[in-house]
Structures are given as structure tokens and as C-alpha cells.
Image (spheres, rainbow, N blue to C red):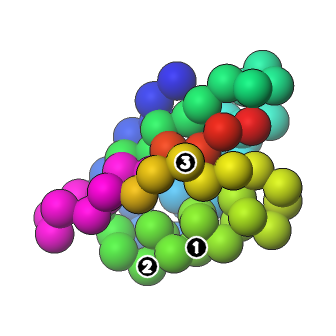
Amino acid sequence: MELDVRGLICPMPVLKTKKALEELPEGERLTVIGDYKPALENIKRFAETNGYKVVSIEDSGDTFKIVIEK
């Protein structure tokens, strides 16, 4: 599943990530794409704090992509 949070600022990217992860079946992966840099660290922290696995993080300067496994 892919979630595009480009154009949003905190706390919306984290809240949308939380909602998407709640709806995701166990073992599935969520790819979050965004462009608000503080959201990357906040999403990563949220995932790790709540027992999700951060599979990968790509930061290309303008956008980021974080893959989280439920």
C-alpha cells in the first residue's frame, strides 16, 4: 500500500500514517511518500514506538520514502 502525504505538514503525515497502518493487514508493508522533512523523523519515531518495523528510508532531497511493515 502506498500513502502520499506530499504537501502536508505535521501532524497530518503522522496521523494519516497511523490510520493507514491500522487498516493494513498484519505483515503487509506501507510506503509513505512525503516532502515535509520533519515528518520523516516523526513517522519513523511513531512506527518504532508502536512496534512497527521500518524497512527502509530513502531521502532524495526534495522527497522522502519510508517503508513500514506492520
Whether label 1 touches label 2, CB < 8 Å: yes
Query: Residue 38: which numbered mark, if any?
Result: 2
Tell me which segment is drawn in magenta: 58-66
Q: Is residue 16 visible?
A: no
Task: Read off the residue under disc 3.
Answer: 55
**Residue at position x 52%, y 24% in the image:** 1
Q: Give the label, 1 or 3, closer to the camera.
A: 3
Circle 3 Cα neighbour tier, 10 Å, few/some/many (<14 / 14–19 / ≥20): few
Q: Write the residue at 46% across / 51% down.
A: 56
Query: Separation of disc 1 and disc 3 at Cα?
Result: 15 Å
Q: Nearer the viewer, mark 2 or mark 3?
A: 3
At label 1, the amino acid type is Asn
Give the quadrant of residue 57: bottom left
Relative placement, left or right, of 42 versus 31 is right
The residue that appears at 16% across and 69% down in the rendered structure is 61
Residue assigned mark 1: 42
Going from the N terminus, do you reach mark 2 or mark 3 first? 2
- Where is residue 8 drawn, in percent x and y? 40, 59
**Amino acid at the residue labelled 2:** Pro
Q: CA distance from mark 2 to mark 3?
A: 19 Å
Q: Nearer the viewer, residue 67 or 62?
A: 67
Quarter holding the C terminus is: top right
Amino acid found under the numbered disc labelled 3? Val
